[in-house]
Amino acid sequence: MAPNGGGGRSSLALALSPRESTAFDRWALTLVRNGVASARLRFALWDGFELPCDGPPVGTLILKTRRALLNWVWDPDLNFGEAYMSGEVEVDGDLVAVLEEAYRALRGARARPSWWRAANDLARAKANVHVHYDLGNAFYRLWLDREMLYTCAYFPTAECTLEEAQVAKMDLVCRKLGLKAGDRVVEAGCGWGALALHMAREYGATVRAFNVSHEQIAFARERAAREGLAGRVEFVEDDYRNISGTFDIFVSVGMLEHVGLPDYATFGDVIDRALAPDGRALLHFIGRNQPKPLNAWIRKRIFPGAYPPTLAEVFLGVIEPHGFSVLDVENLRLHYALTLKHWLERFDRSTHEIATMFDAPFVRAWRLYLAGSQASFTTGAMQLFQVVLARGETNRVPWTRP
């Protein structure tokens, strides 16, 4: 697969497209272009017909079939991704730069009305996690860091390696929480276990970490045993709603996006019953500045059930009902853009191995997802929030920001 997603004309394209575009096709292409009218992007059809742009183009989007063209007109949020995944749309140019240009052109556009506010009950939550996180540890090992952290890293300097930045992220979380030896920690959504193990190894905490992904929990348990930390860290294959006991620390890194807006009250209830009177909590999550559902193609192909909330939605749904004090709010948006740049570079170096594990459409889908995510953070379409909480009456809080 070429780095820019290019390639020759497929048999599918030949079968679905006439030799020459019609006036109707060219009119439909104008509708596509008008959806991002200010973008410095060219749009082209299978026969070479092209709509130029004002100024030097960042790239060209080539629609190789009439089906891709009409589907894009009908539902661009869903069908651009579908057509790119199948190879019916190609991008001539740097994919991230092209997507950044499109996102900037869409800034301020009114979102399509959406009824989508699905609740993620126990069965749905487990099924959603299985789609994304149980693709196989070998797949993620190809492009994540040594710690297998699949959340935003923290770069003290832009020159840090991904490995250094992920360790720095874990330390940042621990410092914000004022973590100390003997603290009892519960983690909701622990991934492959790196943060839980870091808290135990480096800070002397005891940790119970919950996750419904069987593959991730198995990996984390094996690593805990190998590092001699099984007595300090318990990995529980269960849903966050079943957390019980009292803890000094509640932490959730990269899981709130999967809770679902209708279940925020339940999530807040879990934090409330889990936290000791002097307890602290940290929520690390992808969010937005204004309410908007996640892209339909991402929900279908990558993250079913996901929703990136605004701070207001988190405050109203999770924090305010229990009178928690907000101690700190930080936006690490550009740190996530740089994290994704590292991930995409590593992914691109591993496309041959990934194609042998899955297939070419899977490679194209995940490349689009990683590139689009990077573009969404560089353009401000997405945010990455860290929010630190405590009970309103406690004075056991950090004196200064760590």
Image: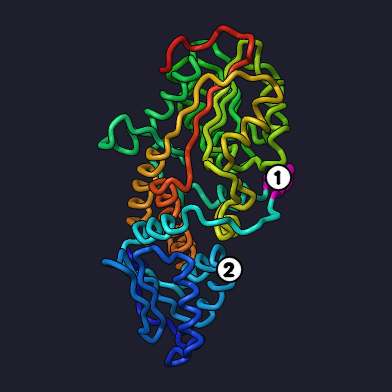
Where is residue 308? Give x, y as percent: 57, 44
Q: Is residue 123 magenta?
A: yes
User: Could you tell whether 154 is left or right of 204 in the image?
Assistant: left
Residue at which label 1 appears: 120
Q: Amino acid type of disc 2?
A: Asp
Circles 2 and 1, Cβ within 8 Å, touching? The answer is no
Q: Name the residue at 71% across, 38% down.
A: 263
Q: Quadrant of residue 249?
A: top right
For label 1, the SS is: loop
Left or right position of 151 against 97: right
Near-viewer residue (214 or 383): 383
- Judging from the image, what secondary structure is the residue with disc 2 in? loop
Q: Is residue 120 visible?
A: yes
Establish if 265 lies above or below 100. above
Classify the position of the C terminus by image quarter.
top left
Vertical arrangement, residue 174 with respect to residue 316, above or below = above
Magenta range is: 117-126
The residue indicated by pointer 2 is 75
Q: Earlier in the sequence, mark 2 or mark 1?
A: 2
Distance of label 2 from label 1 (alpha carbons): 25 Å
Kindly identify the amino acid type of the residue bearing the numbered disc 1.
Asn
